[in-house]
């Protein structure tokens, strides 16, 4: 079912959020990303409404921001079926300037293809220029990564933190740009250091900003600069910037910095372990998911 947007109040700035497949993709509290956008927009006096596209929805409502979370392979198959129907409409929204945040399974589903753990290849709409193949081990743990360039240069805060847990190895298209480069963690594939994907407004013929990432947590509460970049891009509908009043983010940055220092301390502890034990850490994490 597609919930219709509530009508807005004339004269007030309005932000239409569309949460894609919350019934199928919502691990590690990814719905918290929607909540973060709502709270941060409303704090600026922006009128927000939230609609959902579910597996059985008949259409995609008009959007300023689209969000999609992560999930498991079984749910991703259902999402792929729904995207066969709705992928073009989602692309049209982004082409017209809607911003996108796609996390983990959602990132995989919105790429060109995903070879899941059962071996079959699921086709995607190619809204993100990437391909994914499930690997033999899970890549699990804290991530600390540095963003380079990007919207408003991320207000000068180029570090992003979060938690990853995925078997999929993602490879970006030849001209695609990573969202960030990992300092700690596996990132897209455990090999090339890239984390996620970033497409700026206007690239690939789509006016909307697109951010794809493996980071859960959820990612936006601890990385408020990314939430604001999405809101600003959505309000500007593809233009370079929109004025957003600054908020008091002391708690958010406190949580961010605590996560970053815990991740660095943990890495330091692991590096002190004898080499053979160090080599056991990743497989152990992969087995018990910590
Ligand atoms: N099923 C996917 C994988 O393991 C996505 C996992 C997730 O969204 N956390 O790669």
Image: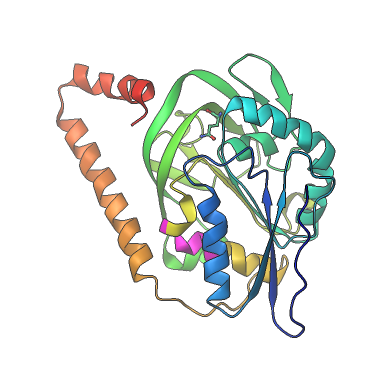
**From the viewer's perspective, is residue 62 above or below residue 169?**
below
Residue 276 position, x and y percent, is: 20, 16
| Colour scheme of the picture | rainbow
Q: Position of residue 156 (x, y in %)?
A: 43, 66
The residues colored magenta run 222-228
Tell me if residue 112 can be seen. Answer: no
Query: How many numbered discs?
Result: 0
At a point 14% along the width and 31% down the height, the residue shown is 272
Is residue 227 toward the left or the right of residue 232 in the image? left
Percent of width and height locating residue 185: 38, 36
**Nearer to us in this view, 115 or 18:** 18
Which quadrant of the rendered structure holds the C terminus?
Answer: top left
Q: Is residue 130 left or right of residue 139?
A: right
Q: Is residue 145 above or below residue 63?
A: above
> In percent of the image, x 27 and y 55: which residue is there?
258
Is residue 224 located in the magenta-colored stretch of the structure? yes
State left or right for residue 183 relative to residue 10. Answer: left
| Residue 221 position in % (x across, y down) | 45, 58
Taking the view exactly as shown, the residue that stands out farthest to the bottom is: 11
Give above or below for 252 relative to 264.
below
Where residue 241 sits, quadrant-wise, is: bottom right
Q: Is residue 216 or residue 9 the one in the foreground?
A: 9
């Amino acid at each position: 079912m597609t919930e219709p947007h509530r009508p807005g109040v004339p004269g007030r700035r309005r932000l239409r959020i569309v949460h894609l497949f919350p019934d199928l993709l919502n691990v590690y509290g990814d719905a918290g990303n929607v909540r973060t956008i709502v709270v941060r927009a409303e704090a600026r006096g922006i009128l927000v409404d939230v609609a959902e596209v579910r597996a059985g929805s008949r259409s995609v409502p008009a959007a300023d921001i689209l969000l999609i979370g992560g999930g498991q392979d079984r749910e991703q198959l259902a999402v792929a079926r729904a995207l066969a129907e709705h992928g073009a409409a989602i692309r049209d929204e982004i082409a017209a300037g809607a911003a996108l945040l796609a996390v983990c399974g959602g990132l995989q589903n919105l790429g060109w293809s995903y070879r899941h753990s059962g071996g079959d290849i699921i086709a995607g709409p190619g809204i993100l220029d990437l391909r994914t193949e499930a690997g033999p081990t899970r890549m699990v743990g804290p991530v600390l990564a540095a963003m380079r360039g990007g919207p408003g240069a991320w207000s000068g805060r180029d570090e992003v933190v979060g938690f990853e847990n995925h078997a999929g190895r993602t490879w970006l298209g030849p001209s695609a740009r990573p969202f960030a480069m990992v300092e700690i963690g596996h990132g897209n594939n455990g090999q090339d250091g890239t984390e996620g994907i970033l497409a700026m407004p206007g690239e690939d013929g789509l006016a909307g900003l697109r951010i794809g990432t493996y980071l859960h947590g959820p990612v936006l509460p601890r990385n408020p600069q990314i939430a604001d970049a999405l809101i600003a891009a959505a309000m500007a509908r593809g233009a370079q910037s929109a004025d957003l009043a600054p908020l008091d983010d002391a708690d958010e940055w406190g949580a961010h910095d605590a996560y970053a220092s815990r991740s660095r301390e943990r890495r330091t502890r692991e590096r002190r372990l004898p080499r053979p034990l160090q080599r056991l850490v990743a497989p152990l994490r992969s087995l018990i998911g910590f």
